[in-house]
Image (spheres, helix red, strand yellow):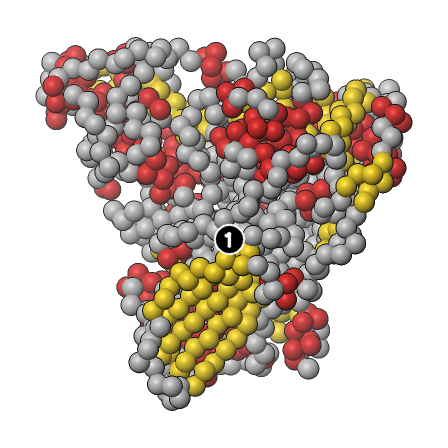
Amino acid sequence: MPVLKVNGRTHEVQAAEDAPLLFALRNDLRLNGPKFGCGLAQCGACTVLVDGQPVRSCVTSVDSVAGQEITTLEGLGAGGEPSKLQQAFIDEQAMQCGYCVNGIIMRAKALLDQTPKPTEREVRLALDGNLCRCGAQNRMVRAVLRAAQEG
Amino acid sequence: MTIETTRRSLLAGSGALALGFSIAGESLAQEHAGPDLPGDLKIHPKISSWLRIEANGRVRLLVGKVELGQGILTALTQLCAEELEIDLKRLDITSGDTRIVPDEGVTAGSFSMPYCGSAVRQVSAEARQILVSLAAAKLNADPAKLTVSDGTVQAPDGTSVTYWALVAGRELEIDATGKAPIRPREARRYAGKHVPRIDIPNKVTGELIFIQDQRQQGMLHGRVLRQPAYGAKLVQLDVAGAEKMPGVVKVVRNGDFVGVIAQREEQAIHAVAHLQTIAQWDVPKTGETQDTVHAWLLTQPEKLIVIKDQPNKAAPADAQVVEATYKRPYHMHASIGPSTAIGLLDADGVTHVDTHSQSVFETGQAIAELLGVDKSKVHCRHVQGSSCYGHNAADDAAADAALLAQAVPGKPVRIQWSRNDEHKWEPYGSAMLIKTQARVDAKGDILDWTLDLWSTSHGTRPGGKAGNLLAGRALEKPFALPTPINGGPPNYAADRNAIAIYEFPGQTVSTHFLTNFAARASSTRGLGAYANVFSIESFMDELAHRAKADPVAYRLRYLKDERARAVLQKAADMLGWGKGEKVAGRGRGVGFARYKGLATYCAIAMEVEVDRASGVVRVLRAVAAADAGEVVVPDGVRNQIEGGLIQSLSWTLKEAVRFDAAGVKTADWVSYPILTFSEVPPITVELIDRPGAPFLGAGEASQGPTSAALANAIFDAVGVRLRDIPFTPARLKAALG
């Protein structure tokens, strides 16, 4: 059975090696963070970090990330202990429905790891491939900048 | 505060007994519910329909309206905790469970605050009044001298009793009187104050909150094979190969409805993909396209409804006539999360459906008709999904899950639609064509105003009818699509906001309502208001320019409602209207409407920059001013107004469904692009609060004004009038010549 390293732990999963990583994370490991949005790598709702890089888990096969460190939204902070970045989204009330927010936070996490003090323009460009239909973009940008400020 | 996420927890945990509740004192004798009860309290006057004081000291609010990402559940808990005088953290809320909550119809139309919010406020005040009277009897004290703190009622002598001790697990089976006073504004802790939304912490940490994340014991995964095009019929399909594919539990076929049930999600997807490659369909040879639909609208059988008929017969015959024609295409709701549902047929023959439908009761009834069972045999429960912005595929997914669940009794079946199916099969916001005509005098003043609009239906919600569900129309014995009707006054549907708020000397408005469809259509945020306000506010701008008048001042000539004037003036001031140097290629525009003529007032102003070479419009900044009556959740209203503004910019700049007889062509995010982070302008929203005034729904108020403000700003920038949505670079370049 394929083995995945997720949020610091190693798991065997039932998913086939060529199955999308997204379904292994959601349905085998019961993680809610990464969401199915399109299955086409177009919207970003399924974003996770693989060795620190943002990856669209809906088009990433299980076997292609064997041995690599996978981080999901839960890996940043869960169980009532949000990370600074997640807390910034609470402080800015940075969403309407929040379905896309996993991808936004994970993409922003990758940006802040690379560029701890980004400009607003840099945040917008980094998030340009993540879709939000509710129109909460400006709140989300403010949340990322707040997290950078407080980082 | 918790939100119900498991099916049994409430029923199992509820110690509340359905006992008649005897109350002390003649003054509290039950009165007949009068017509003065606010909102949905009129149809559900019993306090126990809305509130339960549990023996364990928890309070539960029951509501029929549901969370769609608009923050309504937080707003309702604020109102309840405020009036009941309990801490927010003592309050739980159950919404949209057809076995538990009052039937409040559909969560739509910006009705939740006016209908549910006002009911929750009053019913909570009523409960408090009764509980304080009971406490007074118990403590042998004057009720006027009692104080309440988090559900504990205290007498001046220091003795106290709690609500839950008084109620002792019984239900408040008492009708509301409408007479309990609302707490004065200066005493309020929650209503009108900033309270963080209750759902957001779970959403940023990946806790279980979305329907997409529900995992029931033994759950199977389903997918449905959808037709390639409207009206396509299945000619041949051999399912034997799919049945043998890994993990496939069952292939269900009933007429043109074909679904796969598998152990794993990707196995169901693979099996449907296989079926797609071998299915043979009879696809209609001819049909409309996005380019022919507006001409089609003008040639179909129509129902003509004159909704305003006050022509100015005194207008001189030689008055100049100005005319314009405006068009909108089909727009998608385009939720980021494809529609999802979980169905389960239990041993008692009851089908349980978890759904993010906006209309759990009516959809449950439609599913009962679909399954051929009594409506008591379908139990729907709302669980939050991705925002829908109207009637999207949520109900169709619920029907799919219910149908597939019949094939595997005792096993929950989860359906999540593909992106392709969601884009192709959701019911769109209808294409529309609007003709305006004004007769003006020599100074450019309006003597007479005429508006004619052509539209297909904006309302094909399930409404208890299986024929409104995609699956229902695909069965071997199909349910017919009910003939749609247009919603009438005061809310209207296709003709929502078609009557201009301006007081012209004459105004005539006619709706040309079509019962035929060129593409599947239903309610999309604002219904007809989006295109009607676009047309009215664009035409006002055209007339203002023709009269060589300032567009804001010109509107104010005809705008008598003081609240309307204040909102328009505020937006203009926020933008710095009329101030600053004119910059080449840049322009400013304004748009205004009172949603439905009876809900939130909203004015949008913006500045744009047009690149003549590429035809690309960049919105540099936008402002919004709104009057939503008394504001309970200031941040929530601002979020709705700003979100609507951004969504409307996306519709107006970029979006159009493309289709022909062979099917919908815009089946993903590449072919149907929406506004991205780098395209979203800085936005400022300001509210004019009206304490004591009725709540006015705000969720759809900015859609219409935004589209017109954009068109008007483009005209100001480059002198080109765009009347066909969307304003794509190609269209603008063509117009620039």
Measuring 56% from the left and 65% from the top, which residue is drawn there? Answer: B433
Q: How many marks?
A: 1
From this view, report whether residue B614 is shown above or below residue B147: below
Tell me which chain the residue with mark 1 is part of. B
What residue is shown with label 1?
A: B527
Q: Secondary structure at mark 1?
A: loop
Measuring 41% from the left and 80% from the top, which residue is drawn there? Answer: B439
Q: Position of residue B324 (x, y in %)?
A: 52, 75
Q: Quadrant of residue A61?
A: top right
Q: Quadrant of residue B187?
A: top left
User: Left or right: where does residue A87 sit relative to residue B172?
Assistant: right
Q: Say what amino acid the circle numbered 1 marks.
A: Leu
User: Left or right: where does residue B92 sit relative to residue B471?
Assistant: left
Front-most of residues A28 and B403 = B403
Q: Position of residue B147 (x, y in %)?
A: 19, 25
Q: Is residue B710 visible?
A: no
Q: Position of residue B495 (x, y in %)?
A: 46, 58
